[in-house]
Image (tube, rainbow, N blue to C red):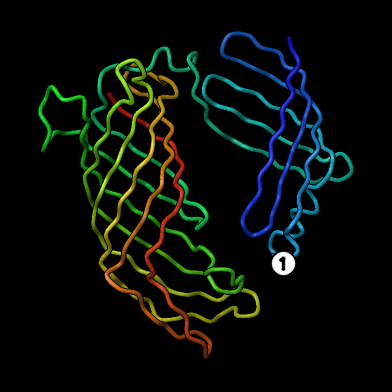
Amino acid sequence: MGLWLRAGAFASAAGQTDAVAGIYAVASRGAIDLWLGARRDWRSGYDDDFVLEDTAREEDKYAVSFGARVGALVVETVQRIDSAASYGQLSFVSSPETRRRVHETPARADGQLSLQLPQVTFQAVVRWHHRLFTPQNSNLGEAVFAEIRGGQPQLGRNPALFVDTMQVSLGSEWSRPVSDKVGWLRLYANVGAGWRREQLLGRDVRRGQESESVDRAVLVAESGIDVDAAALAKHLSLRLRLGVTGWLPTSDATVSIGGTSEVIQRADASIVAGWVLAYH
């Protein structure tokens, strides 16, 4: 049993600020933690975004929070005291306890599912770990990958236009441990090429409007960190991935929608965060 104090804050260049503080009673046994407590959230700077304004107003209150950690999996729910509003989170963590049975043998193949932010899109990747350019005794890992990305992120700050996006690509990836003593933390980088399609879709006051779709060849690159999270079975392990990914279409395109012109197929970059299931 114990007491847990938690606080955090966030500020954006657009003037949005978030903060949270809470106190929790915690019970732990082995790889399981349970906690129950109270928290207070503060949200400001969302008045110009009608999509987020109501959510921010509802979250700027006191709440009761209950959570549990089982190994690398964390589930937490938050219930507002003065309303029926609630929300939660599902996340994965890495700690010495959860990593202690992670396989030391290199992965043969893995699959990844990620989210890209602030352009909210999904990314699904499969990798085959095979050496093409590096020697067998090198501590540099090597893999070839195929990926698909898709979603309908908002076009800039326009809440009525969204970019229907689909991208497929192939490429190579390299990774290495930060050091011999910190093998659970790896740096990675990859490059690839593929095809990207974008189309504008209208919402709300522009519902029903759409532009023509535009296809482009695209170059992609990504780098970041991989963290061992947990061994799930005899031949399976879970890793967490955080990085920055960018894409460069061969050229941008100007399209018409509802009597206005907009530019799509721009080069851009996103934060990518996800989960990797590896087969050893």
> Hey, what amino acid is under mark 1?
Asp
Give the x, y percent position of residue 93: 52, 27
Q: Position of residue 194 (x, y in %)?
A: 25, 59
- Whether residue 63 sits left or right of residue 126 in the image: it is right
* Residue at horizontal 63 percent and vertical 9 percent from the top: 29
Q: From this view, report whether residue 99 is shown above or below residue 40.
A: above
The residue drawn where x is 67% and y is 39% is 88
Residue at 51% across / 23% down in the picture? Answer: 72
**Which quadrant is the C terminus positioned in?**
top left
Front position in the image: 251 or 68: 251
Residue 76's quadrant in the figure?
top right
Which of the 4 image quarters holds residue 38? Answer: top right
Residue that protrudes farthest toward the bottom in the picture: 259
Quadrant containing the N terminus is: top right
- In the shown orientation, is residue 96 left or right of residue 52? left
Q: Is residue 62 above or below residue 229?
A: below
Number of residues whose C-alpha sits closer than 10 Å to that of mark 1, classed few (under 14), some (14–19) or many (20 or more): few
Q: Residue sitting at 54 percent across and 66 percent down?
A: 154
Estimate the x, y position of residue 27 in percent, counting from the top left: 71, 13
**Secondary element at image label 1:** loop
From the image, tell me which residue sits under label 1: 48
| 207 in relation to 10, above or below | below
